[in-house]
Image: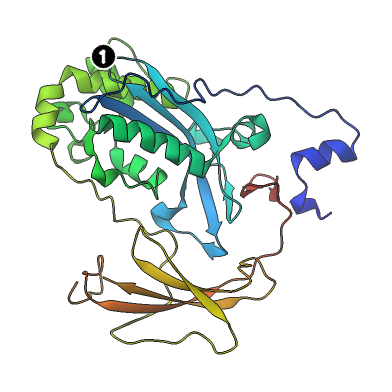
Amino acid sequence: MPVNTISFNSYYQANSKPRRTWQSRARQPTPITSGLKRGQAVGVDCEGVELLTRDGNTLTSYAKKGLGEVSVVHEDGRLLYNTFVYQPSNVTWTLPPQRKKLGVKWGDVRPENGAQPLDKVLADLKTIFDATGIIVAHGIINEIHYLRPLDLSVYELRDTQKASVYRQYAKVPKDGPSLADLSAAVLDYEVQKKGHSATEDTRATVDAYKLERAAIDAEQAGMKFGADSVPWAAPPITTTVGSSIPAPAATSSASSTNSNDGNVSSSSDSGDSSSQTGSLTTSTATTATTATSTGPLPHTAVTTAVRYQPALPNLPGFGQGRAFDKRTSRYV
C-alpha cells in the first residue's frame, strides 16, 4: 500500500500495535426535540474542516468550508445537540491549521470514534430548526456556509455580531465584535481562552442575544444573510450565456438536478468521478433576465458551462471522505 494512503487502522495492524482508543468528546450526540415550540430561539455554532475536492473538482473560497462539529443550545440554556461529523465519500478534506485552535481533532471526525454522517446531522438539525423557527449565531454567514445544503433562509435568523447595539465593542466597527470581545464586555464570563468550543461559543451567543433580544429582533426581523451566495465548487472554466454546448460525443451521460441552486449537470453512467483520466462535464443553469460579468446571475438567463474535472487516483476508503494531513503529506 502506498505510504500516502495508509490509514490509522492499517498502520497499527502493520506494526502489530493495539489500536488507539479515542473517547468521543461529543456531549449530546442524540438530538433533544421534546418541549420545543415555534417562536423559541436556538443558538448554533459550527467548527469546521477544510474541504479540498468534491467529485474530483477542486473547491475554492467558501465552498471549502466543511462541517466538523456542531452545537445547538436552547434559549433556556439546554444543550439540544452536539456531535462531530464525517464527510461523505465523494469528498477529500483536511483539518485547518491547529494554530487556529478551532476545536476539531483528527480522532473526533472518524466514524469509529462516534462521528456521525453529514446527511444525518443535517436532518437532525432541520428537525430542531423546524420546531423552533429562530436561529441565533455569531457571524451567522459562517453557519450558512458550513450547513449547506441545508437552507437556513427559510427560518428567522439572528446575528449577534451584526447587532447595532453591540457594534461599540468591535475593534473594527464595520465587522462587528468577535465573540471573545463581546462576551468579555457584556457577559460575566469569557470564551475562547484556550481555543474554540462549539458548545461554549453557542451558550455565549445565546446569552448575548437574550440580553438585547428586543432590539435585535426589531432590527433583524426578516433580514437575509446571503444564504445563496456560496457555490459548491470552483467556477467553470468556460461559460456561454444563451447558447447550448453539447456534452462530448464519447461520453454517455444522464442528467441529474440539484434542488439547491437549480443546476442540471450531466455525469457519466458509471458515476465514477475518481477514474484515472479526466473528463468534461456539461452543466446547465436556468436563472432572470441578463447575465453580468460579476455577481450572481439573474433568474432567466440560460448558462451552459463546460468544466474539466481533473483525474484523481482511486483511493481506498472506509465509508467517509478521505482525510489529507498537510503536515505529513499523506492521506490518513
View extreme (top): residue: 188
Residue depicted at 81% across the width and 55% down the height = 2
Q: Kindly identify which residue carries mark 1.
A: 187
The answer, for residue 30, to whether it is visible in the render is: yes
Residue depicted at 29% across the width and 24% down the height = 205
Residue depicted at 38% across the width and 27% down the height = 72
Residue 56, image x, y percentages: 57, 64
Q: Residues within 10 Å of mark 1 (few under 14, many from 20)?
A: some
Report the quarter where the N terminus lies.
Answer: bottom right
The quarter of the picture where residue 146 lies is top left
Residue depicted at 56% across the width and 42% down the height = 95
Q: Compare residues 267 and 95 and report the one nearer the observer.
A: 267
The residue under label 1 is which amino acid type?
A: Leu
| 107 versus 273 height, above or below | above
Residue 92, image x, y percentages: 59, 53
Report the quarter where the C terminus lies.
Answer: top right
- The mark tally for this picture is 1
View extreme (right): residue: 16
| 298 versus 90 height, above or below | below
State the SS at label 1: loop
The answer, for residue 192, to whether it is visible in the render is: no
Residue 254, image x, y percentages: 52, 75
| 214 versus 66 height, above or below | above
Residue 80, image x, y percentages: 40, 22
